[in-house]
Image (cartoon, grey):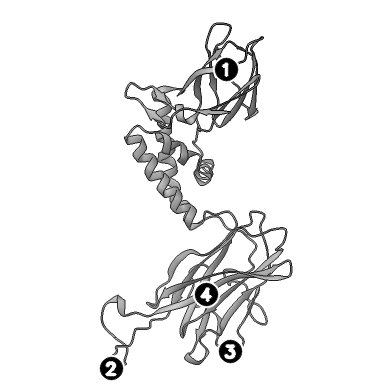
Amino acid sequence: VYKRQAPKGIAAQANGSLESDAGIIVSQTVGHCTVINPAPWTAKVKLDLKPVQVTQCELIHPSASRVTFLSRGPGRPTEMIVPPLSITNLRLDAGVEPASVSKWNASINGGVQTLESLKSKIAEVVGKIGRLAMPSDFAQLRNGGFEAKGQVGIVGWMHTQFPSTAVTLDDSEAVEGAYSLRMETDESSAGRTWLVSEPVRVPKTGRLAVSMSARASVRRIATPASGSPLRDGPAIALEKHHVRVSLEGNQNGVPVRFVADFDVPCDGKWQPRKLVLESSGIRVEEVETLRLTIDSLSPGVLWIDDVQLHDVYATQVERNELQGQAFLAIKGLQQRNLTPVAELLNNRWALFLASQSDHLE
């Protein structure tokens, strides 16, 4: 039977003592008592065991840490310090009487020093959240910067062949290097200008994102009255160039596709490189390779450059969740409530950001 204290949360008291009764879970079975600390800090736990005493302690997880006993023995409460994110199993000697945990309590170990350390870790995560918007590259896409020139066509890519100006390299426009890719679509062929990469192996993470820089030629919205373009006026009068990006392959012989659409302002300016497609949950054992497809779906000229793939990245949903948890953690510190702090520091991407730091504790 699992026993857990009333859900009053994790609170930092004004005198510097930190209580975390709701964070600790105590489980009791015949001859054993298990103490679970799901928080990312050490905790001090006090157990009143009647009429038993602890005869053996086994730290199930993590194996690299240890439990420190401050007090134990016949007639005395068992008081111990358990490591973060740990499961501790206590073997109990009850003699002829049934064992029981009559009461228990817990507190965060370290007092004010622990609180200051948590503030520092939260500030570090908050300061690095922006890095998740542009993750490191997965270097499996050939000629994503369009710098390699081939004898026929564009190295690493298949593309629209007619007319000959539909897809070309442009040495007068580039974000990185000397070349970008120019896709020209007229009114009659809208939706037919396309670019397809060579096969890319699916990463072990089962995730693949696409980022790129893009630029669209200036094109203004026609006025309803005259039908002619607005030559002067606010930025809202500009058209938008519609682009579709997809990753396509086969899963056990069945076509699979991840697709996203985005718009490029027709203002003649390069847009900063950003994530334009996220795919996750790819079954690595069933999907061996994927191809990247880029379609220009609007009339006009579109330039793209610095196309990259990413295999380790946080999705937009995960980034929003992390930002929300960071806000609640900061608010929790102000209100001396550490429950949201534990949730933030246990977040997968908070841990990832922390691992990138050179000065983490």
Frontmost of labels 1 and 2 is: 1
Kind of residue at disc 2 = Ser
Closest to the observer, 92 or 212: 92
Question: Label 1 vs label 3: CA separation?
Answer: 83 Å
The amino acid type found where label 1 is placed reads: Ser
- Considering only order in the chain, which callout, 3 or 2, is on the residue closer to the N terminus? 3
In the picture provided, is 133 more to the left or to the right than 252?
left
Numbered badge on residue 244: 4
Q: What residue type is labelled 4?
A: Arg
Q: Distance between the residues labelled 2 and 3?
A: 34 Å
**For the residues marked 1 and 4, what is the alpha-carbon distance in whole angstroms?**
64 Å
Q: Distance between the residues labelled 4 and 3?
A: 21 Å
Q: SS for tag 1?
A: strand
Q: Label 2 belongs to which residue?
A: 226
How far apart are the alpha carbons under marks 2 and 4? 31 Å
> Which callout, 4 or 3, points at the residue further toward the start of the chain?
3
Q: What element carries label 3?
A: loop
Side (left or right) of 48 relative to 235: right
What residue sits 55% from the left and 67% below the top?
A: 307
Residue at label 3? 164
Which is more N-terminal, label 4 or label 1?
A: 1
Q: What secondary structure is found at the residue carrying circle 4?
A: strand
Q: Considering only order in the chain, which callout, 3 or 1, is on the residue closer to the N terminus?
A: 1
**Residue marked by disc 1:** 100
Q: Is residue 76 above or below residue 12?
A: above
| Label 1, label 2: how far apart the Cα atoms are | 87 Å
Question: In this rendering, which labeled residue sits more in front, label 1 or label 4?
Answer: 1
Tell me whether the residue at label 4 lies in contact with that at label 3, contact meaning CB atoms closer than 8 angstroms: no
**CB-based contact (under 8 Å), mark 2 and mark 4:** no
Nearer to us: label 1 or label 3: 1
